[in-house]
Amino acid sequence: MTFPLIIFVLAVAFSAAWAEPSGWLKALSPVARAFVAFFEWFGDWAVFCGRLARAAFVPPYEAGEFIRQLDELGSKSVPLVALAGAATGVVVSLQTHDSLVRFGAKSLLPAVVVFSIIKESGPIVTALVVSGRAAAGIGAELGAMKVTEQIDAMEASAVNPYKFLAVTRVLACVVMLPLLTLVADFCGIIMGWIANTLVEPMSLRLFIDNGLKEVAFKDFLPSTFKTMVFGLIIGLVACFQGMRTRGGTEGVERAATTSVVLSSLFIILADVVLVRSILVFFP
Amino acid sequence: MESGKAEPLILVQSLRKSFGDQTVLDGIDLEVARGETLTVLGRSGAGKSVLLKLLIGLQAPDSGSIHIHGQEITRLPLDQLNEIRKKIGFSFQYSALYDSLTVEQNVAFPLKRHTKMSAAEQKERVGELLASVGMEHAAEKLPAEISGGMQKRVGLARALALEPDILLFDEPTAGLDPITAAEIEQLILKMQKERRMTSIVVTHDVHSARTLSDRLVVLRDGNILIQGTFEDLRGSRDRFVSQFLNNAS
């Protein structure tokens, strides 16, 4: 049941993301068109990923641009991620406190807050926030470069735009996501403690000690490093949507929107697979 | 012109290109001799810009061949195509300057990637190029901070950075006021004279075509309607050609 549902949701998303159907596609029904768009999108995406992989391993490497993107996509996302992490910490703490009091397990609160933040809330909130900020930014920037012929100018200068524009952004997303997740985890735990302390005073040391007592590396590392996959998804989807932009400002707007929609959707779907895999491989 | 005797620097044979149902170029044959300036005229949507993009490999033709420096480029692998691209400068219709980079960084962009110049040598070369187009005062500015005419100049400086022997101009004077357009024309003429480059100019500005060209071709319905000097075109009895030249001038 889940698989057909996923296919349907993706088909609808691609159908919405699809620009203007042309030629024989116009003759198809909307459902058939969505179906074709679904496979066309994946085919084009696979070709794009192949070109990217080839460009990534062939020198010269664009170190300067990579560092610029680390700052652009990573450092500049820190305040937003910290805020989202902090808000998540408060919500988790308040919700959990209420439930645990009801079941007489109040002492477990620090552990539940820490576990839920480092294992799931921190990584997924970070990924969705970065998807909203960075994917939209990448999609719009590359889309604007495409429609103003800047990408053509790069190719005409014998510079590979896949290497200069896409590889640097994808790698920056992959590297920065785990680091940003640490920021979200930290802020979430601290704000979780503050929210709890306002209701029922507890020292930070006691909260951390209780919270981290049961936490092992197998709880922390896979959950944090799975965000590299989220970063890969954000980078690949946004760069692809940006570099295939057509049709002026409307096309740029569409590239930005579809970058966010598709990368968020893929992150949630990938999370399902990753959580299951982590449970299997790190029981 | 010696176009009939020497081997052409650019040779286009039976070039076809379609987008969906629309045929843009329908078997074009074209020769451009070394040092010649050819202007391609035609209505909007006639396939002029597509022709330029095919010549530099930004688009692939449906069929036909393009020889540049005697090498067939339509089926070349990317690394070999890039070697050809280094010998061609492309001045885009809207300049296509990288808007996150300064004017200086824009001009240095190809130098950084394709030459072994030191940073100081690059800076000196960029300075020379910007001076040659009268833009040395704007080196630190971003493209958004300069006018359209200035952007065209910087785009030209960038196109000249690798000292190409072929220059492709896509609508070099489009969207410019008559004085700025005349300045750009003079700049192109100066470059052609100093560097003896082979140029293809795509435009629907008849005045520019007359000023810049050794030879002109008129595209219509995906084919070459007529080619020759400006005077040959003036003498044509074809209704479209005379209408095009009279309405545009």
Image: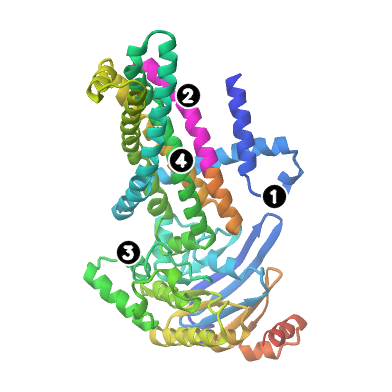
Query: How many angstroms separate mark 3 from mark 2 (CA)?
Result: 45 Å
Q: For the magenta stretch, what is the residue range?
A: A260-283
Q: Does the magenta stretch include residue A282?
A: yes
Query: Residue flagged by tag 3: what amino acid is it?
Result: His
Which residue is the site of mark 4? A131
- Of marks 2 and 1, which one's residue comes earlier in the chain? 1
> Which chain is indicated by disc 1?
A
Q: Dot 1 surroundings within 10 Å: few (below 14), some, or many (20 or more)?
A: few
Between the C-alphas of marks 4 and 2, the distance is 17 Å
Judged from the image, the secondary structure of the residue bearing numbered disc 3 is helix
Q: Are marks 4 and 2 on the same chain?
A: yes
Query: Mark 1 and mark 4, same subunit?
Result: yes
Q: Measuring from the top left, give residue A164's x and y in whole percent.
A: 38, 54
Q: Which of marks 4 and 2 is nearer the N terminus?
A: 4
Q: Do the residues labelled 1 and 4 touch (CB within 8 Å)?
A: no
Residue at mark 4: chain: A
Disc 1 marks which amino acid? Answer: Ser
Q: Which amino acid does label 2 sit on?
A: Val
- The residue that mark 2 highlights is A272
Are discs 3 and 2 both within one chain?
A: no
Query: Which badge, 1 or 4, is on the more N-terminal residue?
Result: 1
Residue identified by numbered label 1: A22
Tag shown at residue B114: 3
